[in-house]
Amino acid sequence: MTSSRRVALVTLGCARNEVDSEELAARFAAGGFELVEDADEADAVVVNTCGFVEQAKQDSIDTLLEARGLDADGRRRTVVAVGCMAERYGAELAAALPEADAILGFDSYPDLAATLSGIIEGERPASHTPRDRRTMLPISPVDRAATRAIPDLPDGVAPASGPQPVRRRLTGGPVAPLKLASGCDRRCSFCAIPSFRGAFVSRPPEEVLAEAEWLATQGVKELHLVSENSTSYGKDLGDVRLLERLLPDVAAVPGITRVRLAYLQPAELRPGLVEAIATTPGVAAYYDLSFQHASAGVLRRMRRFGGTESFLALVERIRALSPTAGIRSNVIVGFPGETAADYAELERFLTEARLDAVGVFRYSDEDGTEAASYDSKVRADVAARRYARLTTLAETLTAARAEERIGESVEVLVEDPAGVGRAHHQAPEVDGEVRLTGGPFTVGDLVRATVTGSEGVDLIAEPA
């Protein structure tokens, strides 16, 4: 294969997919491909799809269709689908989308460069056949470490077995996601992710630290630690408190100025981890809490735990340790069986919790989930009204929370020379930004500033 072959990677979905794409980029580069940003300049486009909710699946299909066309030499461009939607639907997606030259699952990742070379030459590999990836590892988490390298599993680069530090950055900037683990052992009735991402597998601390050190050499200043469920980290390694000890080590990596932890399950959030996040130097006092709802009855039907009072107590405990901590969550409205009283309970919780950011989702049936078979579906018009009302309420509440921060001293990680960046309570892309007055500024600097105003969830701040 010659270096004239060019591949463009298009990433959809979450930060975990971003890490997967950068691992694939390293594989392609090692296989002799030239990585290009513009699909119009590529011989092949690899779309890392998202299969989480209906809109994400449609976006994946639209992106695959848009990638069709001719390359710079007038030849038909090769289009390949990988990622969660490809893993989840495989041959079914291939039959519905003949425009794609291949639909490949996670097990194809280790040899994807060679496979793509063959596809460009006209080969057509068999489409991925989906299976429940939870069955590929022992039920007991502590028995999984010994099976990491068995032949039936990916070699450690495919997401289902926990990635190794094989990576090439696709974007610049001072922020990068770093994957702690892959898979999930929870059985939320609305979620299909465990079936195609597999059982929970932690990356050993030495792997995480090695990749953190490498990212620091690439100019990264903030690490965004991600997984399907970060509060489970270490349980398969025999130490449920391992994350509490890992955080200080990651924060101490030379060149790293901020570490942010994402995807926390309230029911698994131990007091020691709450305290470690709030008090460890270099770790952002930031809590990405997956509440999903506040009505105890709805949460039980979701196969989850908690309710308004326990959630408010957790919020209070966090703010007792760190009064300026950032807290965000996602919630679902219109879940089967949700009554007007259940919905009112959710409104009450959000009003009293004063979260910094709230993502509101309208429930939709997901293939293969328990909730899809539930009776007592909420009427579409009722669910739509609740969704619209809660979205408006969330915007009002989060804007008010931002306004409360006027006068607060914040450290802003600069991501644009014009002075745009983020404070400790703002995760990349989802929680707003801070606009610094004055300038110019140096990208990657951590600037101490005082908040002087707010616009929605965004802040305006004057450097100290």
Image: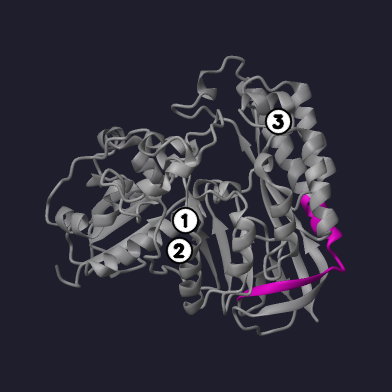
Question: Residue at horizontal 64%, vertical 80%?
Answer: 445
In the shown orientation, is residue 66 left or right of residue 74? right
Q: Amino acid at mark 2?
A: Glu
- Quick one: label 1 or label 3, which is nearer the N terminus? 1
Let me know if residue 405 is in the magenta part.
yes
Label 1, on which residue?
Answer: 203
Q: Amino acid at mark 3?
A: Arg
In front of the other: 4 or 318: 318
Tag in front: 2 or 3: 2
- Quick one: label 2 or label 3, which is nearer the N terminus? 2
Question: Residue at horizontal 60%, vertical 56%?
Answer: 243
Residue 304: x, y in percent?
64, 31
In front of the other: 214 or 384: 214
Question: In this rendering, does residue 358 appear at all?
Answer: no
- Secondary element under disc 2, as helix, strand or loop, is helix
For residue 125, the mark is none
| Magenta residues (range) | 398-415
How many discs appear? 3
Label 3, on which residue?
Answer: 386
- Secondary element under disc 1, as helix, strand or loop, is loop
Question: Residue at horizontal 59%, vertical 62%?
Answer: 246
Mark 2: few/some/many CA within 10 Å (<14, 14-19, 20+): some
Question: Residue at horizontal 34%, vertical 35%?
Answer: 89
Mark 1 and mark 3: span between their CA atoms?
40 Å
Residue 425: x, y in percent?
72, 61
Residue contact between numbered discs 2 and 1, judged by CB atoms under 8 Å:
yes
Let me know if residue 455 is in the magenta part.
no
Mark 2 and mark 3: span between their CA atoms?
44 Å
Question: In this rendering, does residue 260 appear at all?
Answer: yes
Q: Is residue 372 above or below residue 421?
A: above
In the shown orientation, is residue 193 left or right of residue 23? right
